[in-house]
Image (cartoon, rainbow, N blue to C red):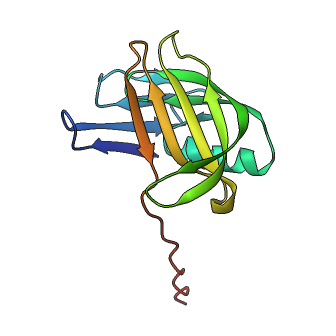
Amino acid sequence: MAYRYHQYGGKKEKKHTLIFDWDKGQISNDYLNKPFPLKAGTQDLLSFQIQLMHDLQMNKKSISYIIADKKRVESYSLQYIKESTIETPFKTLDTLELISNKIRNKTQFKIWSAPELNYLPVQIVKTDDSGDTTKLSLKAISFGTPKPSQK
């Protein structure tokens, strides 16, 4: 399984790929060119959001994940704070607000997930140790109709 990240716009373009090799028990990446040990349950930054949606549907209020990114494999804990209504470019949404532990005593995340969208994370705010923030907000969403299977 592979995870590819590509960010453009802003200060500079960023790209990296993680290869999850379950047989060898390692994650290879093209950023550090150094493999990481692959622990059971490790998620990438996309699959963790799908797992979060599932966990919130199961009414979990305190959740932990092992997430691989371009530099390391890290444990993250999310704690439910409150229900809140937020404005996104998409529309006003009722959400569950969660906050992460501080990672390496530096970075913290807040995540807002919308029950009406199956707990899709609709806003994420990352705050680093200097107080700089990065905000991601849902701008649009569409649900396609599955194509009939070909027999």
Residue at coordinates 38% horizontally, 13% vertically from top-left? 130
Is the residue 38 above or below the residue 54 in the image?
A: above
Q: Confirm whether residue 40 shows in the render.
A: no
Give percent across and percent down for residue 100. Answer: 61, 26
Q: Position of residue 135 (x, y in %)?
A: 42, 38
Q: Residue furthest bottom?
A: 151
Is residue 119 visible from the viewing direction of this image? yes
User: Which residue occupies the foreground of this view, 126 or 38?
Assistant: 126
Q: Is residue 64 above or below residue 7?
A: above
Is 24 or 62 nearer to us in this picture?
62
Q: Is residue 129 left or right of residue 117?
A: left
Residue 67 spot, x, y in % from top left: 54, 30
Q: Is residue 35 above or below residue 98?
A: above
What residue is shown at x 80% (from left), y 48% (from top)?
A: 58
**Which residue corresponds to the image point at 29% horizontal and 24% vertical from the top-left?**
33
Q: Position of residue 31 (x, y in %)?
A: 29, 27
Position of 101 relative to 52 (above/below): above
